[in-house]
Amino acid sequence: MSDALQTIVDFLSSIGIRVRAGSVPADAFLPGLRIVDGGLIFDPAALRWPGDLLHEAGHIATVPSALRPKLNDALADAPTSPHGGEAEATAWAYAALVHLRLPLPLLFHDGGYHGKSAGLILTFTLGVYPGSHGLVQAGMALSPAEAARTGAQPYPHLIRWLRD
């Protein structure tokens, strides 16, 4: 297992997201990765992009805890919740990447984000954080104004990694 993959797996485990190596069908929605009952299963030999673990973990982390066990695979049948969508999952994954001090292309790789990875790298590098407002609304991060009032750190620092 690469150092980056091990770092991600250890982090996800430490915050309470179930993650384990295992068998993943070749037709999985992402190469070498599945969401099963609110946890992650990855095949180290088939996982093409370790950063995908962070993005999928973002989906798990940003939905209310009662909905997590209902999350499976491509999330097409997942229950929806305010501030628990694609933008928030991406913002969560970025915050985790920053926290872990991993390089941006690990998350925003050429094989993901519908060809918009370079644009996302630029956007986040410039301090524009799509999805961060949803994390603030879900009580997972502080806005710059809230952080200034309280003396805490704003997003991309998270005050809570899992939504209640």
Image: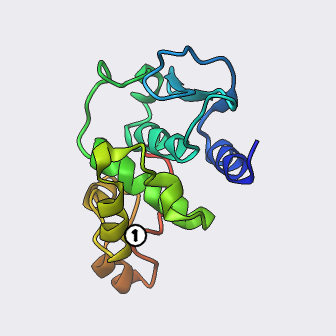
Q: Nearer the viewer, residue 38 or 6?
A: 6
Q: Residues within 10 Å of mark 1 (few under 14, many from 20)?
A: many
Q: Amino acid at mark 1?
A: Tyr
Query: Eyeballing the image, is 34 above or below 87?
Result: above
Q: Quadrant of the C terminus?
A: top left
Q: Nearer the viewer, residue 117 or 62?
A: 117
Query: Eyeballing the image, is 21 above or below 122?
Result: above
Image coordinates of residue 84 in percent, x first then y, are 31, 42
Secondary structure at badge 1 equals loop
Q: Nearer the viewer, residue 74 or 16?
A: 74
Residue, x 43% and y 68% (percent of image)?
A: 156
Residue, x 71% and y 47% (percent of image)?
A: 10
Q: Quadrant of the N terminus?
A: top right
Residue, x 65% and y 27% (percent of image)?
A: 43
Query: Eyeballing the image, is 118 above or below 59?
Result: below
Query: Eyeballing the image, is 58 above or below 41?
Result: below
Quadrant hosting residue 75? top left
Image coordinates of residue 31 in percent, x first then y, are 52, 28
Residue, x 49% and y 63% (percent of image)?
A: 104
Q: How many marks?
A: 1
**Left or right for 112, reference 80:** right
User: Which residue is tagged 1?
Assistant: 155
Quadrant hosting residue 147? bottom left
Image coordinates of residue 114 in percent, x first then y, are 29, 43
Image coordinates of residue 135 in percent, x first then y, are 34, 56
